Amino acid sequence: MTATIEPDVASSDEPQPTFDSFNPATGDVVGTHPIDGREQVEAAVAAAREATGWWQGLGFEGRKEYLLQWRSVLTRRLHQVADQVHREGGKPHGDALLEAGLAIDHIAWAAKHAPKVLGRKKVASGLLMTNQAASVEYQPLGVVGVIGPWNYPVFTPIGSIAYALAAGNTVVFKPSEYTPGVGRLLVDTFTEVVHGRPVLNLVTGLGETGSALCTADVDKIAFTGSSATGKKVMAACAENLTPVVIEAGGKDSMIIDEDADLASAAEAALWGGLSNAGQTCIGTERVYVHERVFDPFMAELLRQAEGLRPGYDDGGVYGPSTMPKQLDVIRSHIEDAIARGGRPVLGGADAVGERFVQPTILTHVPEDSLAVTEETFGPTLVVNPVKDMDEAVELTNATKYGLAGAVFGKKHAMDIASRIRSGMTSVNSVIAFAAVPGLPFGGVGDSGFGRIHGPDGLREFTYPKAITRQRMKPVIMLQSMARDEKTESRFAQLLTVLHGGTGTLPKRR
Ligand code: NAD
């Protein structure tokens, strides 16, 4: 029996309904959490709103101190955090540790860089406005609602939470119903650090709780999850013109050129495809290999895949599928690929068990198969040969998604990376960009829009505030009811000097 998340219906003497989170490897209940309805969500947003005054009043330096303190608390409790992720999400303890560690690095980066990125900066005022001193600063939006997924229940929401907090916002966080205990741990540790002030607040529940957050009095929603839910979030937010950042799904490819180090590429393809049971938004789902090195690459890939297996024990390199209903999706993608002529060289339709999916590698899969067009979110790889790198780029870009990807090669690798229509690409590694805190993280197309991480991720949770300060009276006074024709003609003369050019057209190219 696999456990599915069902609300417990409240009886009359039970004020609030609850739901359980389960260990996906065993089906055991890990924790019981309230299903927060509109009333509780609005109360959380109101509490967060109340706390904005204190939090913003601390300024960048004050907030930095608290955020760095939170970072240290999480670091000291790293094993506790990793254990909670391991039990609710099913991933190996070591993977959970890595995830939490990278998130901690992001908290530190956001806290330390917020003053420089968001603080007041001079802007050149231009020749027409030399009498003005111009500056821009980035103001916090107010209360940010963060809706998170279960596959990286620490790293993913912290990408929004830490950056929103560092920018001066307070936050209401709605973790996935599959990992509410992880969400609680994150919020409790932060609340401890700020002596109980409701700066980072938790609401728990199923989709309806997230939906209520979208239409509560929030100033922005940072959503991470599937593209289908992202569309619902946007629609709900449209009601109040609430801005959104959408971090949605992907169908990332790895491109392997003929001059690539094949052993490294195979190692990366296996890790990018199988780790976390393939439940990584920026995981490798498709591999396009130059036909000249396809056979040696496949031999190396299968050699390295030998003996890899899932499990909840120490020998399992990845865990179960966290969401039981995903097993049907994975099976249907494998079956569809095989029915259309794809060749299973490892695993296959039988690889999908009751909780775990064995590693599956399919080759020569037609490009219109579900395993190529839709997010599989399982430990599967589609590996197809291509005649050259132009074809690899064309096929990579022939997707509605555009999240990330990887390129292995030497001479043309950087050029190929720039030609991929996606938010992020790693050359000669996978997923490396996610661990560089200064880089923006996000996608295009059905993978969403807006950015977390880096300076863009800080600015995402602010609005730019432009200020001009008149330093002296202007030489030509334009903003006056007393402006005369002479002034206008002097303005026109100045404009001609500045922008009149030569009057000749650019040469035809
Ligand atoms: P999901 O869309 O099912 O749920 C995400 C969150 O949205 C959950 O907290 C859920 O309760 C909430 N939700 C559900 N219905 C809602 C509604 N109508 N209004 C508001 N909130 C609602 O996604 P998931 O299964 O938790 O996560 C897996 C997906 O997330 C995959 O597609 C994966 O690619 C994607 N993902 C993307 C990124 C990224 O950064 N781009 C990172 C991790 C995961």
Image (cartoon, rainbow, N blue to C red):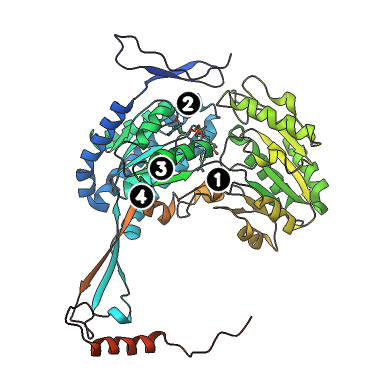
Residue linked to disc 3: 222
Residue linked to disc 4: 461
Q: Amino acid at mark 1?
A: Asp
Question: Disc 3 and disc 1: Cα gap in Å?
Answer: 16 Å
Foreground disc of the pair 3, 2? 3
3 or 4: tag closer to the N-terminus: 3
Q: Looking at this view, is 435 or 165 the one in front?
A: 165
Residue linked to disc 1: 446
Ligand 1 lies under 8 Å from the Cβ of mark 3? no
2 or 4: tag closer to the N-terminus: 2
Q: Amino acid at mark 3?
A: Ala
Question: Disc 3 and disc 4: Cα gap in Å?
Answer: 9 Å
Number of on-image labels = 4
State whether residue 100 appears in this view: no
Q: Are marks 1 and 4 in contact (CB under 8 Å)?
A: no
Query: Which image quadrant for residue 350?
Result: top right
Query: Percent from the top left, x then y, of residue 457?
Result: 41, 51
> Dot 4 lies on which element?
loop
1 or 4: tag closer to the N-terminus: 1
Q: Are marks 3 and 2 in contact (CB under 8 Å)?
A: no
Question: Disc 1 and disc 4: Cα gap in Å?
Answer: 21 Å
Q: Amino acid at mark 4?
A: Phe
Label 3 neighbourhood size at 10 Å, few (<14), some (14-19), many (20+)? many
